[in-house]
Amino acid sequence: MNSGFVLTLIVAWLFVPLVPVHAATFNVTDYGAVGDDSTDNTAAFAKCIEKVIAAGGGRMYFPDGVYRGRIIIPPQGGPGWITIEIVGESEPTPVFGTIGSFPPQNGGTIVKSLETSGAAVISAPPGNLYMGFSGVYVVIRNLNVRTYDNPRISGIDLNHAAQCRLENVVVSTGVYNVQASQPTHGKAGLVTPANNNAALTILRNVLVTGYDTGIVVNEHTDADNIVVASNIHGIKFNTANHASRFGRIGTYRNTHHVTVAGRHGFLIQQMNTEQPGPRQTNERNAWQKLVSDVNDPASLGTGDINYWVVVGNVGPVDTFTKIGGSGIRARRIGSAP
């Protein structure tokens, strides 16, 4: 073949306009869902997600509204995995704080459940992929997930999913975090996939408030712009063979900002903390007073943390409290290595 002709073909190919390939989109309202904050949409969600799976994956789309019900992603086997996107119309407002009282608003896209037992608001039950996992890559974007004060169910439980990505997601208990009651039922705002070598969790712009554990961190987690506020355990590192990275994480009013429950290597590049100061805690929320920045009594963690601590009504302080954590190096930003 003539070399000039080949070059012409290459140049022509380079200038062919790239047409974006979009996943099939399935609007939950087409399957009977109503965002009126009263209709139980669990059955409508199930119909919609069945269509997503039948299409080999796609996007479950929520127009703005308050949708009651639970989203349960049916177990999927191998060898092929599918992508299931759960996407709201509007990016939620990440309201949190260390003082004051701000009632939650119902703008944007909200999925909530007031059930007192059973599955999380969004969950991926075990499947017949190896080790009991489900062959789903779950993507959640632009969504406000709610339960209720002192919840008896979790917000998002993807422990048995293969992989996940969350972006612009708020998980809360329906009250401004400063007014949250002490969680007594051991539930988590977000549980990430624990699928060992195959797991992957990507978190961007995620806020969790009001649970026993804000985020349960399992295998292969990469996170940035994370806030955990008014949980007993802000983030909890479970046993993992692969290290996790957090870029910037805000930890506010948690009893323990970071808890280590199993052997886990991690890096927190900036842990930004504001503790409630004088006159900023009352009888109802006294449980939110800090006990430890790092709670690792068995010294199971191997990690590096760069921190900045502010006490309300006081200002920046050089105080960082560890329980155990002999394998965790903590350094105040700006101090010598």
Image: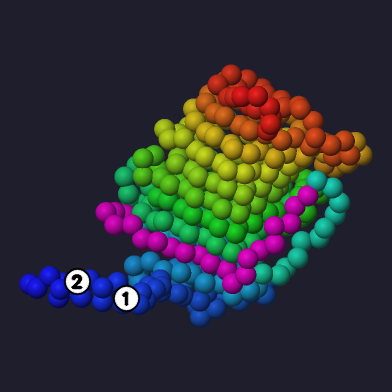
Q: Nearer the viewer, mark 2 or mark 1?
A: 2
State which quarter of the image contains the N terminus.
bottom left
**Place of residue 150 in the rendered image (x, y in percent of width and height, measured from the top left):** 72, 47
State the count of labels.
2
Picture residue at 81% right of the left edge, 60% below the top:
103
Q: Amino acid at mark 2?
A: Leu
The answer to whether 230 appears left or right of 25 in the picture is right
Residue 77, image quadrant = bottom left
Q: Which residues are magenta?
A: 77-97
Tell me the crowding category of disc 2: few under 14, some 14 to 19, or many 20 or more residues within 10 angstroms, Cα based: few
Instruction: Give the residue pinned by disc 1.
Output: 15
The answer to whether 160 appears left or right of 11 in the picture is right
Q: Amino acid at mark 1?
A: Phe
**Place of residue 226 in the rendered image (x, y in percent of width and height, measured from the top left):** 62, 48
262 drawn magenta: no
- Residue 121 vertical position relative to residue 37 in the rendered view, above or below: above
| 322 or 31, nearer to the observer | 322
**Place of residue 176 in the rendered image (x, y in percent of width and height, measured from the top left):** 78, 54
> Is residue 181 something that shows in the picture?
yes
**Place of residue 26 in the rendered image (x, y in percent of width and height, measured from the top left):** 46, 75
Question: Tag 2's secondary structure?
Answer: helix
Farthest-out residue, right? 279
Instruction: Give the residue pinned by disc 2.
Output: 7
State which quarter of the image contains the C terminus.
top right
| 241 or 205, nearer to the observer | 205
The answer to whether 305 appears left or right of 251 in the picture is left
